[in-house]
């Protein structure tokens, strides 16, 4: 009777991260992109909403990958 090969948790973790990469923040709009006419919503308001979605996605990702080390861009 043969014993099963031990699992390789580091490779499993790397495969998990490759299949489920860490969310990246949305690019910040350039200050020159705002027309200054008081648009509703302003491009910066839209960026704030995207940042909220990013933070939620990042929180969920961290729950799925509690041992992952955040990577710096």
Image (spheres, rainbow, N blue to C red):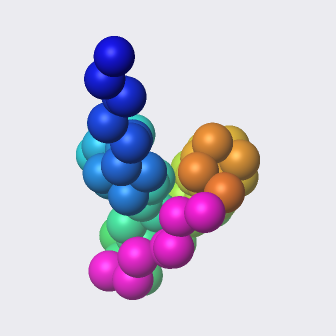
**Main SS category, magenta section:** loop
Q: Say whether residue 70 is magenta.
A: yes
- Report which quarter residue 12 is drawn in: top left
> Taking the image as drawn, is residue 28 in sight?
yes
* 72 with respect to 46 (left or right): left
Which residue is painted at 50% across and 73% down in the image?
A: 70
Extreme residue toward the front, this view: 1
As for residue 5 lying within the magenta part, the answer is no
The image quadrant where one finds the N terminus is top left
Residue sitting nearer the eye, 20 or 5:
5
Q: How many marks?
A: 0
Q: Residue at x 63, y 42 (%)?
A: 64
Can you give x and y, in whole percent of width and height, for residue 53 in the image? 63, 45
Residue 73, horizontal then vertical, whole percent: 32, 80
Q: Nearer the viewer, residue 31 or 12?
A: 12
Which is more toward the observer, 23 or 29?
Answer: 23
Bounds of the magenta segment: 67-73
Percent x, y for residue 15? 30, 43
> Can you give x and y, in whole percent of width and height, for residue 61 in the image?
59, 47
Question: Is residue 34 toward the left or the right of residue 50 in the image?
Answer: left
Task: Identify the residue at image location x=37%, y=28%.
Answer: 3
């Amino acid at each position: 009777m043969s014993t099963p090969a031990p699992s390789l948790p580091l490779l499993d973790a790397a495969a998990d991260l490759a299949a489920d990469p860490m969310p990246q923040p949305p690019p910040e709009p350039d200050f020159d992109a705002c027309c200054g006419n008081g648009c509703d919503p302003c491009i910066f308001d839209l960026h704030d909403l995207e940042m909220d979605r990013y933070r939620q996605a990042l929180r969920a990702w961290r729950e799925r990958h509690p041992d992952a080390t955040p990577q710096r861009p």
